[in-house]
Image (spheres, rainbow, N blue to C red):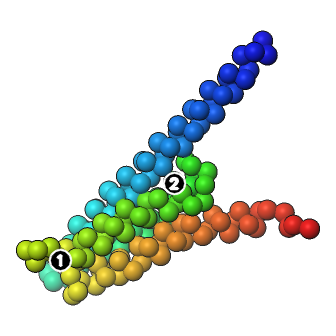
Amino acid sequence: MTDTTPDKNATEEQLDLGLKIVGAFVATGLGFVAGLITAFYAPLRVPGSTAYLPVSLVLALGGNPLLSWFAYSTTGHRLAALLPAVPWCAVWFVAASRTTEGDLIITGDNWVGLVTLLAGPIAFAVGVLVPARRALRAAPPAG
């Protein structure tokens, strides 16, 4: 009976590693999708008005820390919480860059896009730093 226990533990470890890898890919993909959704909602306006709706900003402030938490909780590594931030920022960099035809998603007169471009990475940082501070507070003092 003791011969099957190491195999079972090895299988569980392989399954755990596989789930962590899948979780990292899912978190990265969700970061990309969230970046696309927030970028394309940035120019959203109130119908019949010139006022912008801050849907993109609300999604970034609420969703980005959740994406960081998801990446951390699925992988168990604090630095993995940055995985969704990389594609999110890449999408926003492309959305704020002009194409060869002159097209631009995030324009300079769109306050929602500009504030989201600033607040989105900060929201990811909050999603990384809050669990790190909690872990430091929970750890017993050395010495």
- The residue at 47%/72% (across/down) is 123
Q: Tell me which amino acid carries mark 2.
A: Ala
Give the mark nearest the N terminus, 1 or 2.
2
- The residue at 56%/66% (across/down) is 128
59 or 36: which is nearer to us? 36
Question: Element under label 1?
Answer: loop
Q: Quadrant of the C terminus?
A: bottom right
67 or 83: which is nearer to us? 83
Residue 116 to residue 14: above or below: below
Q: Residues within 10 Å of mark 2 (few under 14, many from 20)?
A: many
Q: Tell me which amino acid carries mark 1.
A: Arg
Q: Which residue is denoted by mark 2 in the rendering?
A: 71
Residue 31 placement (x, y as % from top left): 39, 58
Between the residue at mark 1 and the residue at mark 2, the CA separation in whole angstroms equals: 31 Å
Residue 108 placement (x, y as % from top left): 23, 86
Residue 52 is at least partly visible in this image? yes
Q: Are marks 1 and 2 in contact (CB under 8 Å)?
A: no
Question: Element under label 2?
Answer: helix
Q: Residues within 10 Å of mark 1 (few under 14, many from 20)?
A: some
Dividing the picture into quarters, in which one does residue 77 lie? bottom right
Q: Which residue is denoted by mark 1 in the rendering?
A: 98
Image disc number at residue 31? none
Residue 55 is at least partly visible in this image? no
108 or 97: which is nearer to us? 97
- The residue at 30%/73% (across/down) is 93
- The residue at 33%/64% (across/down) is 35
137 or 52: which is nearer to us? 137
Residue that extends furthest to the bottom in the rendered view of this protein: 109
